[in-house]
Image: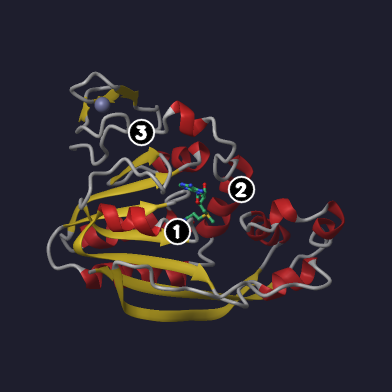
Amino acid sequence: MRPLFICPVCGGALRKNEKSLFCVKGHCFDIARQGYVNLLLSQQSSLKHHGDDRLMVKSRADFLEKGYYGKLKDRICEVVSSLVSSPAVLIDAGCGEGYYTRAAAEALESVGLLQSAGGIDISKDAVSFAAKRGGAVQYAVAGVFNMPLSSGCADIVLSIFAPFAADEFLRVLAPGGYLICVHPLENHLMELKQAVYDKPYKNDDVFSVPAGFEQTASEEIKGFIRLASNEDIINLFRMTPYYYKTGEKDQKKLESLTRLETRVEFGLEVLRKI
Ligand SMILES: C[S@@+](CC[C@H](N)C(=O)[O-])C[C@H]1O[C@@H](n2cnc3c(N)ncnc32)[C@H](O)[C@@H]1O
Ligand SMILES: [Zn+2]
């Protein structure tokens, strides 16, 4: 398989040998045992933020594997498949453990519409987990604001609950390419928040179309999920941004909960590069 990623140092094409990716200028990047490549440069990797840690990654993977967000996953696959009519390059920017990446790539592959798929995340734990699952997706540890991808290489970029790097998405998309963005709506997980906080806040629900794109579709996916065990409730809480911001006293409120019905509300935006 030809590498999708380019050299993060010089921007040259990368080639693959058994254990590494390398460019003509001699920059070389080891392929990890799990199959991903770390393309974060040392000055980037010394930044404080390394993305989600192992506990968040494991919690999210366990939660998602139970199918609670299956409806969203299926809808993303339908939308992705409806956007292209010839084999496409799909990039998941901020792919986490690759739950949606794998599914979207498989959906395209099953109808002969996948040229190649790439997953990018700044968390080594998340990418390592994603790569272990195998499949047709190539994974790299890298930041979404500076992706190791050549300009105009992508037909579809996914940005699912991940940092939104509008200018970089515009750069890597081919003219006419699509950006699919999924974000939480105002009342997403409200009952979970009510179980933890005395005064739960609503999410900010502001999505604006960035320059260089036109919006071709916008939909809301709303429903309730019934969490059937304490483990699932804790996993859901740990995969949210609230987890590390919540004091011990509030976190403890979840310890005795064994069932919880909470609303899930996602906004799904489809934008086209003008
Ligand atoms: C809420 S998770 C969503 C993961 C995945 N899209 C999903 O929905 O399952 C956000 C992800 O963004 C990653 N992330 C945060 N900052 C990033 C950055 N600057 N570049 C790339 N990934 C980043 C985190 O490591 C994490 O995996
Ligand atoms: Zn190079």
Quote the CA–CA distance across marks 3 and 2. Answer: 21 Å
Residue 226, position as x, y percentages in the image: 63, 73
Mark 3 neighbour density, 10 Å: few (under 14) some (14–19) many (20 or more): some
**Sequence order check, earlier mark of 3 and 2:** 3
Quote the CA–CA distance across marks 1 and 3. Answer: 26 Å
Front-lying residue, 169 or 60: 169
**Sequence order check, earlier mark of 1 and 2:** 2
Q: Looking at the image, is 2 positioned above or below residue 231?
A: above
Residue 234, position as x, y percentages in the image: 70, 57
Residue at the disc numbered 3 = 35
Front-lying residue, 241 or 230: 241
Q: In the picture, residue 5 is in which quadrant? A: top left
Residue 30, position as x, y percentages in the image: 35, 23
Residue at the disc numbered 2 = 56
Q: Looking at the image, is 18 positioned above or below residue 198?
A: above
In the picture, the quarter occupied by the C terminus is bottom left
